[in-house]
Image: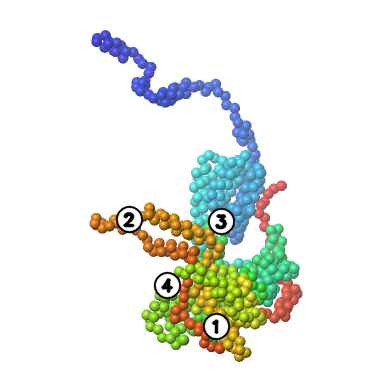
């Protein structure tokens, strides 16, 4: 034992080259310790550095330096600013012996939030890509780009070029060639973008304030000159003054349209006469090439009848400056009789209705609204299958007035209505009561007036019962009208067709279709071929996109369905011992069928089977707090019913509604002559005498519009 102790003491006294605890180190730790010791013993005194060729040449290279200048507006102060920038940078670059002047790129009057719309900037980047520039000098990050992604993206692209292109921002003293510039540039670009956003919001608030107080923008407009007149506060305001020579052209355009000329024909005549459009081509020369779209743009501008509608478009994103049509996203502001008109409001309104109708294939001139204002068919409107000049609201309101449901004159001047938005009214602006809502049933107030006119007296409970009956429905099988001998009409989104039973019942060559949007009925009666709304009665489908649109909107029908309505036939004996027939269609008694939706019907049936199969496995339960109560299965009854109704609609058709006594009954009272009472026009045709149009054309040829002065702009200044 003493020998062992003696050996241990001798071993402890000897110095050890292995660190204490090394026996417990892992293999990985041993490798790291060995590597550290190896690095400590390395000697770099014998190593010689051979410099890279690019590094050696960089110090002696003459840099080709370009300047970029931008201002966002073209007012006098910023014009001076950009001129001073151009001179300063040119002198600064030329005074440096290591720099060579590569030109100055200028964007005068361009926003910094969208680089795609800055010709000078795009030319600068393109020249940098092709190796013409080594360095760019600009005033500040906000001058280069106010869009964070654009700014960082272009800087990275320039740095990655071979050789790389540096950008020096003078105000921030920032050189992108330095390694430390990245995070600083990112922060500055983000600040510049947010600053642009705040300016955009401030500008929108300013516009809102100005528009609400009648301070509208005054852009250049063909037919007008912009002038400044003193205001009552010692300043000046801009306004439109008629340019008589150009106004003659505008008057002729409207007159030609009202007389049946197409916008293509109008554009062709103006191009042939070399009338300047007021714009310029890309090469700076005057543009005398008129297009159909350019003619429509003039016809649609409400300023030609003296009105102003502000905020017809808006810009949802301040970065890309892309405008969108304002469909209620922003406030609109309208002021009638804002300045002198070139054409009357009657002419302008009629032109809007013609243009609206042309989109549905209407060819020709203006067609006035025709309505029956007395007798058995009071409130029925004679419809033209290709005329789309009036909206569903127009027909509904006219029918209400004729039936005595609105206390207004039926001869209310349609030609002088305010239709500033491409021929459409702006809601909550025209009158106190507005346009009555198109609904399935009459309101209680309307119903009481109607009952008084018809001599019926009902209690309030009767009105509630009637409304309840109207709101209820039953699902009817789709084969309800499958028999060929049943006279029916089929109404789709683009056409309307009466089956052979209908054409056989009413023996005539031409027919007139009458529509009452209040009572939701259609009456078809014989008419002469010369009638402006006559349709050929031969059983073939009639293209009627505009008419079908009115019916769909009035009935609030689903556009994914076509509708079949059964016919009620009224027969009348006449003196020559023959019988004449009139067809009546109750539009609330319909069957809706999916349009080419066979696959959807199959899917609906399959989904129904899957739901039934899963019913046993997929259930949810609720256990009440009382242990003795049985668990209740959770079923959303309303949701289940809704799903089943949707499936039934696709399989069997939309439920059929039926009229009650709340609606007027057409029971055959009256003579044949009373049923043929003509619908009278509410407004005139607006046709203009051809001699007036010829006189306007002679004035244009004898005294054509004066040409505007030439304008020149230098975007890029370079040497050599």
Does residue 45 lie above or below 401 as drawn? above
**Which residue in the structure is indicated by mark 4?**
472
Disc 2 is placed on an element classified as strand
In three-dimensional space, the C-alpha distance between marks 4 and 3, rounded to whole angstroms, equals 51 Å
Q: At numbered mark 3, what does the secondary structure look like: helix, strand or loop? A: loop
From the top left corner, tell me how far across and down residue 277 is, in percent. 68, 67
Residue 529 in sight = yes
Checking the image for residue 570, the label placed there is 1
Q: Residue at x 69, y 66 (%)?
A: 290
Q: Residue at point 53% right, 57% down?
A: 318
- Choose the circle earlier in sequence order: 1 or 2: 1
Please identify, in this view, whether the residue under mark 1 or under mark 2 is nearer the observer.
1
For mark 4, does the 10 Å Cα neighbourhood hold few (<14), some (14 to 19), or many (20 or more) residues? few
Q: Quadrant of residue 506?
A: bottom right
User: At which x and y percent is residue 496?
Assistant: 58, 72
Name the quadrant of the N terminus: top left
**Lower position in the chain sequence, tag 1 or tag 3:** 3
Q: Residue at x 54, y 52 (%)?
A: 147
Q: Give whichever of 577, 690 is nearer the camera.
A: 577
- The reply to whether the C-beta atoms of the residues labelled 4 and 1 are less than 8 Å apart is no
Disc 4, disc 3: CB below 8 Å? Answer: no
- The residue under the point 53% across, 75% down is 566
- Determine which residue is flagged by label 2: 621
Q: Nearer the viewer, mark 4 or mark 1?
A: 1
User: What crowding class fits label 3: few (fewer than 14 Cα within 10 Å), some (14-19), or many (20 or more)?
Assistant: some
- The correct choice, above or below, for 54 with respect to 458 in the image is above
Q: CA distance from mark 1 to mark 3?
A: 63 Å
Say if residue 339 shows up in the picture: no
Task: Tell me which label, 4 or 3, sits earlier in the chain.
Answer: 3
């Amino acid at each position: 034992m003493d020998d062992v102790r003696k050996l241990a003491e001798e071993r402890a006294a000897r110095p050890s080259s292995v660190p204490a605890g090394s026996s417990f180190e892992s293999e990985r730790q041993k490798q790291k310790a060995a590597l550290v010791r190896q690095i400590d013993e390395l000697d770099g005194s014998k190593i010689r550095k051979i410099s890279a060729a690019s590094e050696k040449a960089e110090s002696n290279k003459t840099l080709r330096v370009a300047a970029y200048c931008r201002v966002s507006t073209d007012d006098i102060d910023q014009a001076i600013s950009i001129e001073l920038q151009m001179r300063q940078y040119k002198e600064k670059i030329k005074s440096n012996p290591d720099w060579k002047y590569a030109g100055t790129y200028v964007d005068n009057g361009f926003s910094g939030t969208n680089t795609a719309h800055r010709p000078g900037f795009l030319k600068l980047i393109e020249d940098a890509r092709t190796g013409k520039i080594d360095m760019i000098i600009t005033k500040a990050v906000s001058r280069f780009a106010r869009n964070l992604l654009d700014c960082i993206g272009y800087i990275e692209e320039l740095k990655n070029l071979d050789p790389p292109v540096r950008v020096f921002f003078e105000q921030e003293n920032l050189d992108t060639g330095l390694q430390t510039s990245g995070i600083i540039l990112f922060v500055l670009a983000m600040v510049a973008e947010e600053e642009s956003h705040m300016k955009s919001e401030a500008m929108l608030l300013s516009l809102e304030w100005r528009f609400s107080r009648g301070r509208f923008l005054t852009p250049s407009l063909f037919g007008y000159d912009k002038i400044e007149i003193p205001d009552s506060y010692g300043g000046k305001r801009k306004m439109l003054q008629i340019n008589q020579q150009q106004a003659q052209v505008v008057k002729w355009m409207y007159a030609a349209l009202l007389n049946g000329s197409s916008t293509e024909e109008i554009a062709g005549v103006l191009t042939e006469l070399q009338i300047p459009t007021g714009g310029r081509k890309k090469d700076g020369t005057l543009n005398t090439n008129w297009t159909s779209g350019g003619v429509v743009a003039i016809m649609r501008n409400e300023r030609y009848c003296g009105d102003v509608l502000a905020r017809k478009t808006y810009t949802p994103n301040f970065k890309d400056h892309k405008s969108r049509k304002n469909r209620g996203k922003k406030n609109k502001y309208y002021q009638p009789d804002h300045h002198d008109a070139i054409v009357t409001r009657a002419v302008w309104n009629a032109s809007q209705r013609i243009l609206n109708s042309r989109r549905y294939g209407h060819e020709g001139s203006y067609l006035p609204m025709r309505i029956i204002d007395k007798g058995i068919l009071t409130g029925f409107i004679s419809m033209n299958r290709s005329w789309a000049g009036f909206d569903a609201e127009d027909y509904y309101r006219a029918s209400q007035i004729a039936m005595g449901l609105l206390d207004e004159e039926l001869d209310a001047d349609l030609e002088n209505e305010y239709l500033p938005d491409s021929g459409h009214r702006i809601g909550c602006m025209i009158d106190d009561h507005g346009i009555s809502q198109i609904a399935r049933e009459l309101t209680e107030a309307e119903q009481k007036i109607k009952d008084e006119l018809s001599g019926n007296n009902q209690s309030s409970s009767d009105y509630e019962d009637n409304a309840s009956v109207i709101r209820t429905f039953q699902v009817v099988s789709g084969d309800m009208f499958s028999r060929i001998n049943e006279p029916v009409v089929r109404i789709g989104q683009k056409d309307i067709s009466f089956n052979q039973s209908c054409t056989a019942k009413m023996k005539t060559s031409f027919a007139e279709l009458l529509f009452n949007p209040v009572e939701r009925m259609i009456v078809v009666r014989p008419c002469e071929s010369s009638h402006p709304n006559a349709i050929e009665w031969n059983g073939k489908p009639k293209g009627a996109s505009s008419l079908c649109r009115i019916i769909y909107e009035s009935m609030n029908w689903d556009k994914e369905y076509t509708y079949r309505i059964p016919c009620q036939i009224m027969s009348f004996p006449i003196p020559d011992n023959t019988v004449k027939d009139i067809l009546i269609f109750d539009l609330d008694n319909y069957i809706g069928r999916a349009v080419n939706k066979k696959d959807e019907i199959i899917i609906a049936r399959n989904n129904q089977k899957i739901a039934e199969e899963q019913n046993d496995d997929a259930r949810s339960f609720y256990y009440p707090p009382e242990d003795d109560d049985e668990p209740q299965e959770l079923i959303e009854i309303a949701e289940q019913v809704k799903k089943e109704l949707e499936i039934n609609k696709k399989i069997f058709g939309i439920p059929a509604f039926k009229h009650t006594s709340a609606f007027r009954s057409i029971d055959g009272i009256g003579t044949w002559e009373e049923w043929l009472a003509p619908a009278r026009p509410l407004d005139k045709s607006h046709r203009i005498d051809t001699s007036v149009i010829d006189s306007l054309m002679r004035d244009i040829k004898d005294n054509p519009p004066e040409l505007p002065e030439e304008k020149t702009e230098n975007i890029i200044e370079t040497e050599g």
